[in-house]
Amino acid sequence: MAFTGLVDGENGRLYWSGGCGAIARLAAVAAVIFLVRGAVQYGQDTLMAKAALAITLNLRRQTYAHLHRLEVSYFETTPTGDLAYRLTEDIDRVGEVINKFSISLSPVSSN
């Protein structure tokens, strides 16, 4: 770029040459970098969430299939609220943990 700095030896002041065009180009480059980073971050978050949802769906299907193999006596002794909670909340928590773990391993950070 045609953006150079000059230091005045007497005052220690910094003078820039290159004019407003150089500043505008620098601002445009910075804006493009931030937009690309945001797009990459969005794509990564979307892919990680999709993967966590796929794992959660698979876990729900396995749990539902396992429920069908259980004896009727299990359902007579297990409170309905406990069973419903395990089928919904516990599996959702597993999905959240998977999503957070996969984001922590990713190279693009939101910080």
Image (tube, helix red, strand yellow):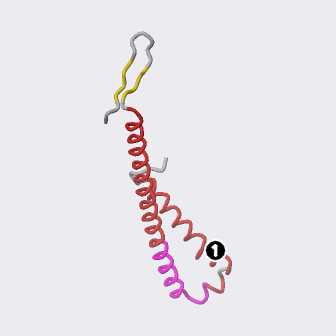
Q: Which secondary structure is most common in the magenta stretch?
A: helix
In the image, is 2 to the left or to the right of 10?
left
> What residue is at 42 percent from the left and 60 percent from the top?
44
Residue furthest out toward the bottom: 72
- Above or below, comparing residue 110 to residue 96 in the picture: above
Disc 1 marks which residue?
85
Q: Is residue 10 magenta?
A: no
- Residue at point 59% right, 90% down? 72
For label 1, count other residues whose C-alpha is less than 10 Å away and answer few (under 14), some (14-19) or many (20+): few
Q: Position of residue 31 (x, y in %)?
A: 43, 47
Count of numbered marks: 1
- Give the magenta-colored segment's residue range: 56-74
* Image point (56%, 69%), residue name: 92
Q: Residue 50: x percent and y percent?
A: 45, 69
Q: Nearer the viewer, residue 63 or 72?
A: 63
Q: Three-letter amino acid code at disc 1?
A: Tyr
Answer left or right for 13 relative to 18: right
Element assignment for label 1 = helix
* Figure check: 49 above or below 75: above
Residue 78, x across and y down, in percent: 65, 80
Quadrant holding the N terminus:
top left
Foreground: 74 or 16?
Answer: 16
Q: Residue furthest top?
A: 10
User: Residue, x 53% and y 63% (percent of image)?
Assistant: 96
